[in-house]
Image (cartoon, grey):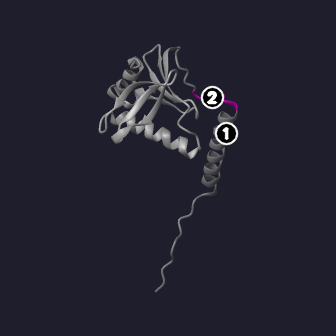
Amino acid sequence: MSQAIHEPVVPRGWLFAAAALVLFSLAAATTVRVTGVGGAHMTLPAAVESRDLQFEDGEGGAVQVFDASNHRLIDTLAPGSNGFIRVVMRGLARERRLGDIGAQPPFRLTRYAGGQITLTDTSTGKQIDLGAFGSSNTQAFARLMTLRSAK
């Protein structure tokens, strides 16, 4: 007793159509990437306020925040507090280590006309829209904008 095994056969026309769809998608993506035509661009409103900050490790796990313009201490983040700021800064510091960039270039905290707040690493150009992480996390950084240097 023998049974014939039938392999599923895909019609040739379907294979050509699938290949054409893949090629079209690649061509369209390449065109947008190279020319910029058809791509979505986000333009930020005018900057209302900005402040350059430097972050340094303090004693016992504290993080010290300095105003980069005069290197005056504006805040000390106690160990176990301000988790969001610590996580964001740890990620940016890791990128700097990978790029062999020191801690000297400041980070720029910017508030825009619409209330949006971003943090930019001035050495790598990486910009983080803090609003994407919720209002309480955004406020953790916004508070640093308003603190004045300790005399």
Segment colored magenta: 35-40
| Amino acid identity at mark 2 | Gly
Q: Is residue 139 left or right of residue 42?
A: left
Magenta highlight on residue 38:
yes
Residue 13: x %, y % from top left: 63, 53
Q: Amino acid at mark 1?
A: Thr
Image quadrant in which you'd find residue 37: top right
> Residue at point 54% right, 24% down?
42
148 within the magenta span? no
User: Looking at the picture, how far across and down is residue 111, in whole percent?
Assistant: 46, 18
Q: Quadrant of residue 81?
A: top left
What x and y, as percent, mark residue 115? 42, 16
Residue 132 shown left or right of residue 106 in the figure? left
Residue under pointer 2: 38
Give above or below for 37 relative to 80: above
Going 38% across and 31% down the picture, which residue do you hit?
Answer: 133
Query: Disc 1 vs disc 2: Cβ atoms closer than 8 Å?
Result: no
Query: In the picture, which quadrant includes the C terminus?
Result: top left
The disc, 1 or 2, on the residue closer to the chain's N-terminal end is 1
Magenta segment, prevailing SS (helix, strand or loop): loop
Q: Secondary structure at mark 1?
A: helix
Q: Quadrant of residue 28?
A: top right
Query: Which residue lies under the disc numbered 1?
Result: 30
* Label 2, residues with CA under 10 Å away: few <14, some 14-19, many ≥20: few
Seen from the viewer's position, the closer of residues 95 and 38 is 95
Work out whether residue 11 or residue 131 is closer to the camera in this orientation and state it. 131
**Residue at the location (53% across, 69% down)?**
7
For numbered disc 2, what is the local secondary structure? loop
